[in-house]
Every structure is written in structure tokens, then in C-alpha cells.
Amino acid sequence: MVNTINNQIKGKPEYFQCGKYKLPIGERTYIMGILNVTPDSFSDGGKYTDIDSAVKRAIEMVENGADIIDVGGESTRPGYQPVDPLSEMNRVVPVIERLAKEINVPISVDTSKAAVAEKAIMAGVSIVNDVWGMQRDKNMAEVVSKTGAGVVVMHNSHSEEYTDLMGDIIKFLKESIRIAGNAGIHRERVVVDPGIGFGKTLQHNLEVMRRLKELDCLNVPVLIGTSRKSLIGNVLNLPVNERLEGTAATVALGIANGADIVRVHDVKEMTRVARMTDAIVRT
């Protein structure tokens, strides 16, 4: 009851509607497991490029506590090589088709291309995770609207220059929410992501983490993706494969500052971190 009241005060919807799934907001933190079927992602590129290994990894993540599986077919790491829509579809769609038959949790597709999103939804996806907040491909909002999928709109920028960091991020995300509304996508189907590591310096990323609660003004659930990122590597001076503890710190503090979903590679460990943090902050 307390969580429901708190969400009503904040204005967040009581649930996140994504396709046939309805995820209550405020009761606990949801774990989004990362499944990159790419050869060049910064952390796990090349590990899950064949269908069997990708499906096996997804099943393992669900068994370890993942509530959502996020499938990506194009790396978005700094200096990434863009992938054409057909190549991206060929990477993600066969995996999604198999996953839709073998797991019973929402599947997300990490893409900013409407054509890829539409094919992925037809294959079984319930959430579109757009790193450009539906502001790069003008057809994305229509695809999400007509299919009933949920959408994660992330802040992104080609520049690391800001007049007012959180103000600029909130302005961008408000525009994404406006685009969603104009396309008929209700607030229950929208999640925002401040875009840790995208168009931001180390100090920007640290500031966003400190000021995460300011996103409450948007009145929708919040997702953060800090897992193994350079934010952690730069602070701790550690390579990608040694950033577990740093990721845990960002997940715990992110949840304490209002995150509803955390996007992670290390599902088993971060599920434990989330459950412990939830026991403290969700009272």
C-alpha cells in the first residue's frame, strides 16, 4: 500500500505495460539482463553471436533472476561501427524467435531503427529500448504505438557540452515523452533512461547518478544502465572484466535514488544487490 501511495504522489504509473506483460512499479527493482549478439560490444562482444549460445545465455540469466532480456544487434560503445538495418535484423530476429518460445519474461530489443524494432516485435519482443529516445528515426513512435510494445527512451547526445546537465537531459526526455504521447503511446508504456555513458564525461556521469531523483518530475519509471561501463573503469582504474563491485555500487545507489529497472551483465550478482537494496529503501 505504501509503495502504491508513493507512486501516486510521484505521479509514476502503477505499472509498466509492455505487450502482454504488466510490471507493477514500486514493489521491487526489475533486472534487465543484457544479451549482445554482436561481434564488437565493449564487454561481451563475440560471445553470443550464434543462436544456441545466445539462447543458452538468456535462459541462464532468467534462472539467475532476470525479469527482462534485452537483445542488442548493434554495439553502441564509443567508436562503434554502424550496422545497416538488414544486418541488425539478421542478428537479432532469429534469437528473439527462439527466445519467445523458451522464456516467459518480456524480451526487449536494443535498437534505434524502426524497421528493426517492427521485425523484432513481430518475432516476440515486448519492449523497444531506443538509445536515441525515438528522436532519430521518425517512424519509431508509430511502430511502438501500433504494436502495443513498451518503450525505453534514453537520453543521448553527439556533444558533451551542456548548459545545464540535468535540465538538458530532462528537456530531451520530455520531448521523447511528448513524441510518445502524440503517437498514442500512453505513459504506462514509457520508461526513461538518463543515458549513463552516452554523450557525457566522467564527471557528467557521476553527477547524473547523484541527481537521479530529479527524473521523478517526468512521472514515469526510470531505467539505468551502468554495468561495467567506463564510468566505473575510470574511477577504479580497472578493465571491463573487473568492474563487478563498481557496478554493484552504482546499482545500489541508483535504486536508492529512484531507479525502477537496472540493465546489467552480471545478473545473479546484481539481482542480489537489488533485492538487498530493495529491502532497505522500498518500505
Image (cartoon, rainbow, N blue to C red):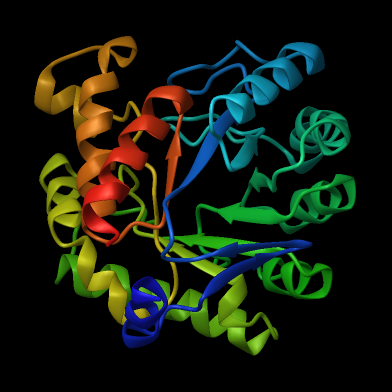
Q: Position of residue 171 (x, y in %)?
A: 33, 78
Q: Position of residue 107 (x, y in %)?
A: 70, 44
Is residue 274 at least partly visible in the picture? Answer: yes
Residue pictured at 10% horizontal, 27% vertical: 235
Where 10 sits versus 275, above or below? below
Residue pictured at 32% horizontal, 78% vertical: 6
Residue pictured at 69% horizontal, 84% vertical: 183
Q: Nearer the viewer, residue 25 or 211?
A: 25
Q: Quadrant of the C terminus?
A: bottom left
In the image: residue 68, left or right of residue 9: right
Q: Quadrant of the N terminus?
A: bottom left
In the image: residue 199, left or right of residue 16: left
Which residue of the protein is positioned furthest toward the front in this rendering? 1
In the image: residue 50, left or right of residue 210: right
Q: Nearer the viewer, residue 277 or 225?
A: 277
Where 216 sits versus 29, above or below? below
Where 274 sits versus 43, above or below? below
Quarter of the image holding residue 75? top right
Quarter of the image holding residue 110? top right
Quarter of the image holding residue 105? top right
Q: Position of residue 98 (x, y in %)?
A: 86, 29
Q: Position of residue 73 (x, y in %)?
A: 67, 33
Is residue 160 at least partly visible in the picture? Answer: no
